[in-house]
Amino acid sequence: MSNRHFLILFLLLGIAAPALAQRTDSTGDYQPAPQLFRLNPEQYNHHFSFALPNGGMLYVDFLRLSDWGGRNQFTRITAAAAQQVRMLRDSFSSNFSNKLLAINIPIDERVILLDYKEDLSNKNQMAMKEGQYFRLKSGSDTIRIVRNTGVRTKPAADSGLIQLQYTFVLNNLDDILELDGRPEVMDRIGAEADAAIDKQKQKWSRPDARHHTLVLQYDPSREKPMRTDVMQDRLWPWAEKNLAIYCGYGAIVYNNSISVHLEPVIAYRLASRGKSQGYIGFSSSIFGLLSPSKEERGQFYTTYNLELGTYKKAPGFMQQRTSIALGIMNRYDVNGNNPRTNSMTLFHMGINLGVNSFLSFGLLMATNFDLRPADKGGDPQGFLGLRFSFNL
């Protein structure tokens, strides 16, 4: 392939590559549906925990700080939970079972949705005291409330139903009735939470920025009951939320030769609500040192690129990466046998296509854009390679 033909291919693939990088799943644009009785994993961002009387706990989880609203709703939520416990007490068969009561409160609060479960697997656990047996309750009862407060339209990455999740973990469901009868307890806890949130909002220029995570821990037995932990003030939590890493290894076929190929990528995650995560990042690769070809032996290649693409949302390293990369390719002759190619820099473009969670293939192209014939001082150089990679 002449350098002119190679340049045309380079430009055509450059035009087509952005569409490839924006490839979506066959199911189309995906938006996770709001859950009735539990938040989606993406909504667990701000996390508050409050110690309650009788050894109970209240946990509150939600996505953005503005979802909290102007003031807490603890007294209102406690009253709603207590009302459902009063109405459903006869639906449970044992006082010693572990119970779950799940509640969904819609925006207009007209139709309350409920789900309840009872775990009787430990019904035969007993305790013996002074020659008498007593039933033993070894677990906690849980009341989980998902409250819908509105609909967010901007930014698109966070669009959808605004939901807060309140989880009461109690020794007994009847403890919620005691809390409902002592509204001053929840008012005091709520006032502490409001004050901590207001204080943190003043410190953040953009309180709803997606990298912000606020953790509150309230325990009235401590000298200072409320503790505040701002996760993004530490480097690692910020990096864990915003950065991703790809590690690929495999083989590349090029210039009638084959070589081991290594490729690391560090990426900054773009805001996304779909099955695929968009990113912009820096990628590099190295190959050629282990080439068995006599023509290529002693030469190796490195690339350094700016990359735009998507990958499958999953824990751990990036998977099913699809992208376009633009940068430079350096070629070195470590033996110094060819002075013309001891060191050469070419413009580089790479196309990557993730086949599944662990396998991908890509096309590497490079040129110096020199279209002059040799008799006029031209020195056209080009590179074309096909890569197959496995990833961690």
Image: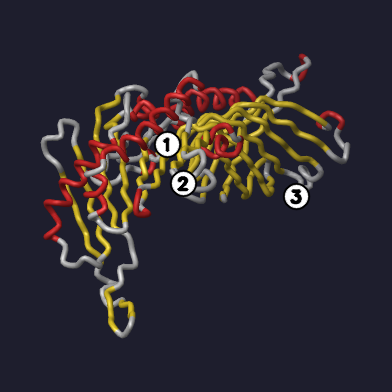
| Colour logic | secondary structure
Circle 3/circle 2 CB separation < 8 Å: no
Residue at 42% over, 36% down: 46
Element on which disc 2 rests: loop
Q: Is residue 177 left or right of residue 259?
A: left
Q: Which residue is mark 1?
A: 46
Q: Is residue 298 left or right of residue 221?
A: right
Label disc, if present, on residue 290 of the rendered structure:
3
Residue at 20% over, 41% down: 79
Distance of label 3 from label 2 (alpha carbons): 65 Å
The part of the image, by quadrant, that contains residue 150 is top left
Circle 1/circle 2 CB separation < 8 Å: no
Of the residues under marks 3 and 2, which one precedes in the sequence? 2
**Front-most of residues 59 and 163:** 59
Specify few, some or many for label 1: CA neighbours under 10 Å numbering under 14, 14-19, or 20 or more. some
Amino acid type, residue under disc 1 in the picture: His
Q: Which residue is mark 2?
A: 221
The part of the image, by quadrant, that contains residue 2 is top right
Residue 84 x/y as whole percent: 16, 48
Amino acid type, residue under disc 3 in the picture: Leu
Of the residues under marks 3 and 1, which one precedes in the sequence? 1
